[in-house]
Image (cartoon, rainbow, N blue to C red):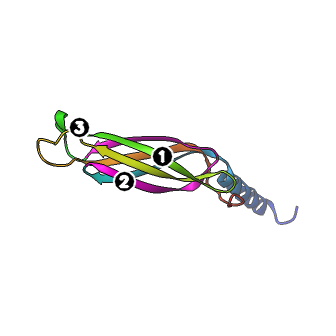
């Protein structure tokens, strides 16, 4: 055995780290978007990872200040399109956000909201060999 046990253990540990970095696992990508008042917005999101399949998309919105019952806006978020590599890996999404105020708020103030967007799926943190 040349080099002793320590270099072999270091080599084994390095191989394990490399394998772990290339192993697919459940990943979550979260974004927040602040909007002021009623209207529409479009957001391009870069996942900074490679989802192996189309991720599950969920969302919610939170008011920055308390809203009266008659001031509740209607909100929606929708994935308009997915960004994919040539090999079909999901790397981003184009998301549309809509806030509709059915009645004029008694306070006259437009709602300030934060949309919380979340994408969950099987992803790989390593991009080696997946480009294109």
* Residue behind mark 2: 41
Q: Identify the secondary structure beneath mark 2.
A: strand
Q: Which residue is drawn at 68% across and 61% down?
A: 131
Name the foreground residue: 5 vs 96. Answer: 96
Badge 1 local density, few (<14 within 10 Å), some, or many (20+)? some
Kindly check if marks 1 and 2 are in contact, taking CB atoms under 8 A apart as contact. no
Crowdedness of circle 3 by 10 Å Cα count: few (<14), some, many (20+)? some
Rendered residue at 38%/48% (across/down): 97
Please report contact status of discs 2 and 3: CB closer than 8 Å, yes or no: no
| Residue 73: percent from left, percent from top | 26, 40
Q: Residues within 10 Å of mark 2 (few under 14, many from 20)?
A: few
Residue 107 belongs to magenta span: no
Q: Residue 92, position in %: x, y? A: 54, 54
Which circle's residue, 1 or 3, is located before the other in the chain? 3
Q: Tell me the magenta residue range.
A: 38-63
Name the residue carrying label 1: 79
Magenta highlight: main SS: strand
What is the quadrant of the C terminus in the image? Answer: bottom right
Q: Do the residues labelled 1 and 3 touch (CB within 8 Å)?
A: no
Image coords of residue 71 (percent x, y): 19, 38
Real-space CA distance between mark 1 and mark 2, rounded to the nearest whole angstrom: 12 Å
- The secondary element bearing badge 3 is classed as loop
| In the depicted structure, whether residue 32 falls above or below residue 6 | above
Q: Is residue 66 left or right of residue 99?
A: left
**Which residue reaches farthest bottom?**
3
Furthest residue in direction top, as rendered: 69
Res. 72 mark: 3
Disc 1 to disc 3, C-alpha distance: 23 Å
């Amino acid at each position: 055995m040349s080099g002793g046990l320590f270099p072999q253990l270091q080599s084994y540990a390095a191989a394990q780290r490399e394998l772990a970095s290339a192993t697919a696992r459940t990943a979550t990508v979260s974004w927040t978007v602040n909007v002021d008042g009623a209207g529409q917005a479009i957001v391009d999101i870069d996942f900074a990872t490679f989802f192996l399949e189309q991720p599950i998309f969920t969302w919610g919105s939170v008011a920055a200040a308390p809203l009266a019952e008659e001031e509740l806006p209607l909100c929606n978020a929708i994935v308009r399109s997915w960004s994919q590599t040539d090999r079909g890996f999901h790397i981003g999404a184009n998301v549309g956000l809509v806030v509709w105020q059915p009645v004029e708020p008694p306070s006259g103030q437009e709602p300030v909201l934060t949309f919380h967007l979340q994408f969950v799926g099987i992803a790989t943190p390593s991009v080696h060999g997946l480009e294109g």
